[in-house]
Image (cartoon, rainbow, N blue to C red):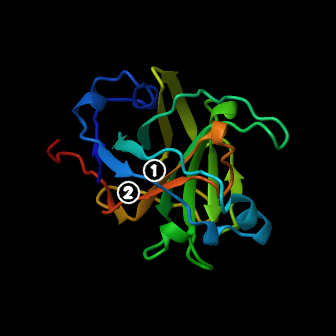
Amino acid sequence: MKAQYIKNVDLKQLRDLKSDFWKKIQPNILPMNPTPVAMQPTQAIRSEWESKPYGLVKEVSLSAAHNGRFVAFRLEWTDPNQDENRHDNSIFSDGAAVMLASVPGAPVTLMGAPGMPVNILYWRADEGEQGRNIVAEGIGTSRTVDQEMVVCTEQWANNTWQVIIARPLKIDTKEGIAQLSSGKEMAYGVVIWNGAGGERAGIKSYAAGGDQLVIGEAGWPS
């Protein structure tokens, strides 16, 4: 999958769901599956969800573009409920994330490993346009390292979520953040949480990209 280089656009245009260039980018249609119960971090969670349905989102459309400074990921999936509220431990919001391998070989499906972090770009419906930059080095190790660099655009209509998650290609930090540049390749994945189904944390739908994400270079054909 290629993050297509789009010249002469700014961050506002990259984040605009109606920008014409998005219509010209062929999306990846990724089948999604529930994360295995065995991968949940505690026995209590495994027991609670062993017989419950979850992983309710079965497919997500993903496309990507960049302008040489910022990269944007556009996600679209079917959801009959617009869950934008979160309260205590009974009401949960919809959410989505793009996961990037911060270093070569980092296991995205396992949310990284010690010394091999993954970078999670996270949107949640109750937090609106402000996303989260998250780092993980294995299941149950996720931590938010920044709440300013990741910005989002969202729209729910006709039983469908459309979400754009954007961030700078390069981020000056000592954290295990994926650093992106033209021509660079990395493993990636997508996660969706369905709030109406009580999904949160490790209870979610997951898709692993079957290919590598490539940051397109200027002059590459569309």
Q: SS class of the residue under badge 2?
A: loop
**Which one is nearer the viewer's eye here, 122 or 37?**
37
Q: Return the residue at label 1.
A: 169
Look at 60% across and 79% down and name the residue there. Answer: 115
**Which one is nearer the viewer's eye here, 31 or 26?**
31
**Which one is nearer the viewer's eye here, 33 or 154?**
33
How packed is label 2: few (under 14 Cα within 10 Å), some, or many (20 or more)? some
Quadrant assignment, res 64: top left
Look at 63% across and 33% down and name the residue there. Answer: 125
Name, please, the residue furthest toward the right: 88
Residue 29 location, x and y as percent? 32, 46
Q: Which mark is residue 181?
A: 2
Residue 70 location, x and y as percent? 44, 42
Q: Is residue 173 visible?
A: yes
Q: Which mark is residue 21?
A: none
Residue 177 vertical position relative to residue 137 in the rendered view, above or below: above
Look at 41% across and 44% down and name the residue there. Answer: 60
Disc 2 marks a residue whose amino acid type is Ser
Residue 50 location, x and y as percent? 66, 63
Residue 83 vertical position relative to residue 142 in the rendered view, above or below: above
Q: Is residue 137 visible?
A: no
From the viewer's perspective, tell me whether residue 30 is left or right of residue 179.
Answer: left
Quarter of the image that includes the C terminus: top left
Quadrant assignment, res 203: bottom right
CB of mark 2 within 8 Å of CB of mark 1? Answer: yes
Residue 30 location, x and y as percent? 36, 51
Q: SS class of the residue under badge 1?
A: loop
Name, please, the residue furthest toward the front: 51
Residue 176 vertical position relative to residue 29 in the rendered view, above or below: below
* Sequence-wise first label, 2 or 1: 1
Disc 2 to disc 1, how far (Cα)?
A: 6 Å
